Image: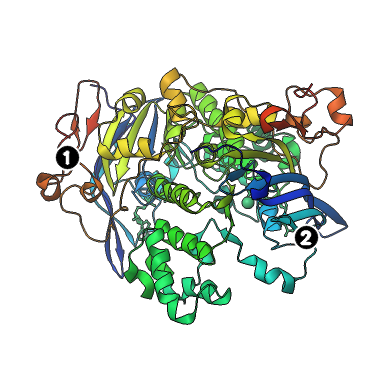
Amino acid sequence: MLQDAPSPAETVLDVAGLAKSFTVARSWLGRGRKSLRAVDGVDFSIRRGETLSLVGESGSGKSTLARLCLKLIEPTAGRIQLFGRSIESLPPRAMRPLRRNLQMVFQDPFASLNPRLTVGQILGEPIRNFRIAPEADIAARVEALLARVGLPADVVSRRAHEFSGGQRQRIGIARALAPEPQLIVLDEPVSALDVSVQAQVLNLLGDLQAQAGYAYLFVSHDLAVVRHISHRVAVMYLGRIVEIGPVERLFSAPRHPYTEALLAAVPDPATRHRAGTRRRGTGLRGEIPSPIDPPSGCAFRTRCPLATERCARERPALMAGKDGHAVACHVRQD
Amino acid sequence: MTEPLLRIDQLRVRFDTPEGVVHAVNDVSFQVGAGETLAIVGESGCGKSVTALSILRLLPSPPARLAGGSIRFQGQELTSLGETALRQLRGDRIGMVFQEPMTSLNPVLTIGRRLTEGLRRHHGLSRRAARERVLALLERVQIPDPSRRLDQYPHELSGGMRQRVMIAIAVACAPSLLIADEPTTALDVTIQAQVLDLIGELCEAMGTAVILVTHDLGVVGDVADRVVVMYAGRVVEDAAVDDLFSRPLHPYTQGLFAARPNLTPTVAGQRARLTEIPGMVPSLRAGVTGCAFAPRCRAATAQCRAQTPLLRPFDSSGHAVACHHAGGDA
Ligand SMILES: Nc1ncnc2c1ncn2[C@@H]1O[C@H](COP(=O)(O)OP(=O)(O)OP(=O)(O)O)[C@@H](O)[C@H]1O
Ligand SMILES: Nc1ncnc2c1ncn2[C@@H]1O[C@H](COP(=O)(O)OP(=O)(O)OP(=O)(O)O)[C@@H](O)[C@H]1O
Ligand SMILES: [Mg+2]
Ligand SMILES: [Mg+2]
């Protein structure tokens, strides 16, 4: 399934120096305003037919980055190009026709589907809004969408709450497919699902991509799922990408100490079964620091077993190595 | 044979709801030995929490109703035990940790108040002595800067810290049994590893047995000695962890292993399709006839649809399975 790198002409999304700060009250008493850098200068691109996954601990900025790419929130700095066209400063009106190319699937299919609407209405709306098909063809389109996500046609008249979690996620995916997008951003799309149903949805996403060449930006904290679905993976820590590269390389030869620690922390039935031993004490000490007052230099240094004095002084840049594998670490990039 | 620490026999729990009776737990039996870690795994709604909560009678009743069975802890029958005696057991000989510590920590009590309260009630310690003990406890669960934490409220702590506090409360009286219901499900993988290690170390040191409820087979492999797999309110397989991982017998257990993507794929560089378990879990609103897994099982026969398979020993190692075709003609 892994393809060769497509030509640059097939780049769907390209972001550079992307940043987002939020203004927050410093304490819960509300004294003093502070800036929180949720996303702090991020570069990457996604090509047609490619899945780029974002991983990292809670609060590392994955969802904020995903929402920036969809222009659901405005960036504080940086550039976002969709098919080579800058969209970061497009006003909503100019953005509207481009939106059909950018769709989203959320974690909680329950919360993201309007309980008053039937499945037919939920799926018909984007087809109508983006004028994908004439009114007379909408019913047939909806039926075709349902078939693509493996739901029977007779569900059109039912409402979202009548479905199981896995079925609701299929409806959420069908809704994202309705305007025939190029890029689909999926924020924890299988996190709420049981493993047996998770497998169904992951297979569906793989099949759809193989058929139609969708680009996926896939947000997940589940590294096993990420390994399965991705072509490339970006590891985030406190708003920055600390390592990015092809999935096989990143998992078999991680370079950033944070990536190593994340992988070591995953309890994996397969490795356990082979080694017959228990993981103990390979984990990371301490917790992710507050993004309001991040550590100087490399943000990871406070938990890093390799940190040197230079790491406190100088922020490491994300340096491209061979095979598109890049790491932001003073110790590991020399 | 000596009596195990905990022995559950033919436990049956029903919920009486306006829409009908929910058959949440059906004839569940298992044992936990002293110092042993037993994991209960299975998908959402299969009855893991209801089973765990039944032990200390923590389910709201109504709608919950014990419809049969026995729960013996240290030789004592719990199902007929009075409320006062049961309350004595809670937090003394049996500790509990839940998934979301925010809901089990009183938001208006400081961490210090919450912790000292239990100690003073169970052990009649003075305020000073209790505070000393609590500081020692917070240190034991590796909370940085413990004296400052005493004056903080639950919402001021991270999820991982709150779970450490819950663990401190649960193990304060060195219980014989710790019941942990998805204690790390809401936590990041690095914090999960820390919390699991912490539970493991503390319980090993005190000789505390653990019932760990989880849906994550990876976690099971890391921490459990024995595993009980539940499906639709029943135990479908019960085995030592190594036996379960090297030879899962029930088609559902096999399905769980196959459906889960692995960190280390068996065929390097190749992303095979995941093996799906078709369909979905049955509703527990009506009693199920036959094997509840039959509608999703590739090996199901007419016998499976007609007759409920009972949990029976498969070999002498204590590996038990509830499947008409396990191990052979499946
Ligand atoms: N609207 C907002 N206002 C203020 N702070 C915000 C806002 N949205 C996000 N943040 C903060 O930005 C940081 C990154 O949040 P984000 O939701 O992007 O993280 P995440 O990686 O998606 O985490 P999770 O795994 O928990 O979903 C966090 O510290 C969060 O508290
Ligand atoms: N208060 C209640 N009223 C009615 N039914 C209930 C109640 N609590 C639980 N149930 C039902 O009992 C069954 C078992 O629920 P339980 O909470 O034990 O599942 P679980 O295995 O812990 O699932 P999860 O992994 O989602 O926590 C479910 O079908 C559930 O709907
Ligand atoms: Mg998020
Ligand atoms: Mg539960």
Type of the residue with mark 2: Glu
In the drawing, does residue B181 fall left or right of residue B246?
right
Give the colour scheme of this rendering: rainbow
Is residue A95 visible to us here?
A: yes
Tell which subunit mark 1 falls on: B
Q: Which corner quadrant holds the N terminus of chain B?
A: top left
Return the x and y of residue B80 as percentages of the image width and height.
28, 47
Q: CA distance from mark 2 to mark 1?
A: 62 Å
Of B183 and B328, which appears nearest the observer? B328
At a point 49% along the width and 29% down the height, the residue shown is B269
Query: Would you place residue A161 above or below residue A198 in this image?
Result: below
Secondary structure, mark 2, is loop
Please tell me which residue is depicted at 48% across the width and 28% down the height of the picture: B264
Q: Secondary structure at mark 1?
A: loop
Foreground pick, B238 / A64 = A64
* The C terminus of chain B sits in image quarter: top left
Q: Are marks 2 and 1 on the same chain?
A: no
Residue B35 versus residue B70 in the image, above or below: above
Q: Position of residue B17 (x, y in %)?
A: 31, 66
Q: Residue at x 54, y 24 (%)?
A: B201
Residue beneath label 2, please? A88
- Residue at the farthest bottom position: A136
- Mark 1: give few (<14), some (14-19) or many (20+) Cα within 10 Å: some
Q: Nearer the viewer, mark 2 or mark 1?
A: 2
Chain assignment, label 2: A
* Amino acid tagged 1: Leu
Residue A235 figure quarter: top right
Crowding at dot 2, Cα within 10 Å, few <14 / some 14-19 / many 20+, comes out as: many
Label at residue B310 = 1
